[in-house]
Amino acid sequence: MVHFTSAVLLALSAIAMQAQGAPLLNKRIAQTISASTTKWEEACKAAGGGELCNPVSVTAFTTLLAAAGPCEQQDSADAMIDLAKTLNNDAEMIRLAQIFAQQPRNTPNSLAVPYCQQAPKNSELNGLFQCQFQGANQQSFVGGLAVGAPGTIPFGHTEPLNPLGSCAAHPDGPIADGSQLSDITQDPGLGNVSTGSGDSSASSTAAAATSTEAAATTTEAAATSTEVSATTTTAAASTTTAASSSNFQLQNALDAQKLNAQFASLTADSSCSDGDQACIDGGFAMCVGGKFVNMGCAATTQCFALPLVNKAGTSLACTTQDDAAARIAAPGATGGITGSD
């Protein structure tokens, strides 16, 4: 039996600990994750981001999977803003990144999803956290955590949200299951963010739209951005970065092919260890209590192992077969999704 390694995330670990007892999966609340960054990617390309836009977009929307860690979505929103700051502090990209940071994440069992418990890198994200979907039980979080337990109150807050499941961009409460926050509102809701000690008054600045902040943050982006480093400083530095990254990107693609080939032989009855993740019968699955639980994928998509583009490793995501094949082929891997074509 192949043991599949991946980041052991808070939500999945908590679910695994619940393996003995009441049924875990009541209803999977899913979404078309790729739609969450479509508008941001369009704005990025319009701002001149070119080929840098899609990798950041893809990495971001995969953080909405049920398997993602509580801070991965915020980290990706930071990366989206990092890139925007190298493109003349594009206000539209920053606004859409702020909305993305508040998009609800998939929940595998109708429970609310825990909040990140650390500050973002970029001040434009201060005080922002994800909304919840209406179909999630707002009184209980993934892992069976009751409201008030660590992770159930957003970073910087001392009391549960009122109303539960709300966020700055949608202060009235949770949003409809599967919907995209960027389709519901154009306003990231910075006016709804408290300027107290936990939420930092910097979040009330209008997405770095002023020229004063533009001057201050361009330097910060050049010094701190790792995901878009190929765009900074000199052409020589860019060439060096591209050369070093291409090696791990190709290896990531080869690793993704190997995983997809292994997944093809798995069934729901395959043995597994708690925390394992796999793609089974086209759906995203995780191991709970020694058995794979298939959570499926949204219509027209399937689960594939995909290569990461900014660091070594792979991720599992629901996407189209053509998209998966293109991502694997991009760094030079041949043989298609499994490497055997």
Image (spheres, grey):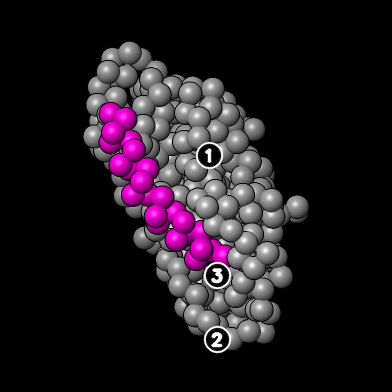
Q: Quadrant of residue 137?
A: bottom right
Report the span colored magenta. 234-259
Q: Quadrant of residue 78?
A: top left
For badge 3, the amino acid type reads Lys
Q: CA distance from mark 2 to mark 1?
A: 35 Å
Label 2–label 1 contact, CB within 8 A: no
Residue 54, label in figure:
1
Work out whether mark 3 precedes mark 2 in sequence or the reverse, and give the earlier one.
2
Q: Nearer the viewer, residue 190 or 278?
A: 278
| Mark 3, residue position | 258
| Mark 2, residue position | 1
- On the question of residue 181 being in view, the answer is no
Label 3–label 2 contact, CB within 8 A: no
The location of residue 284, given as percent across then percent down, is 62, 65
Label 1–label 3 contact, CB within 8 A: no
Number of numbered callouts drawn: 3
For badge 2, the amino acid type reads Met
Residue found at x 47% / y 28%: 49
Residue found at x 53% / y 82%: 2
The location of residue 223, given as percent across then percent down, is 24, 34
On screen, residue 66 versus residue 145, left or right, reads right
Q: Is residue 62 above or below residue 129?
A: below
Q: Residues within 10 Å of mark 2 (few under 14, many from 20)?
A: few
The location of residue 190, given as percent across then percent down, is 43, 28
Q: CA distance from mark 3 to mark 2?
A: 14 Å
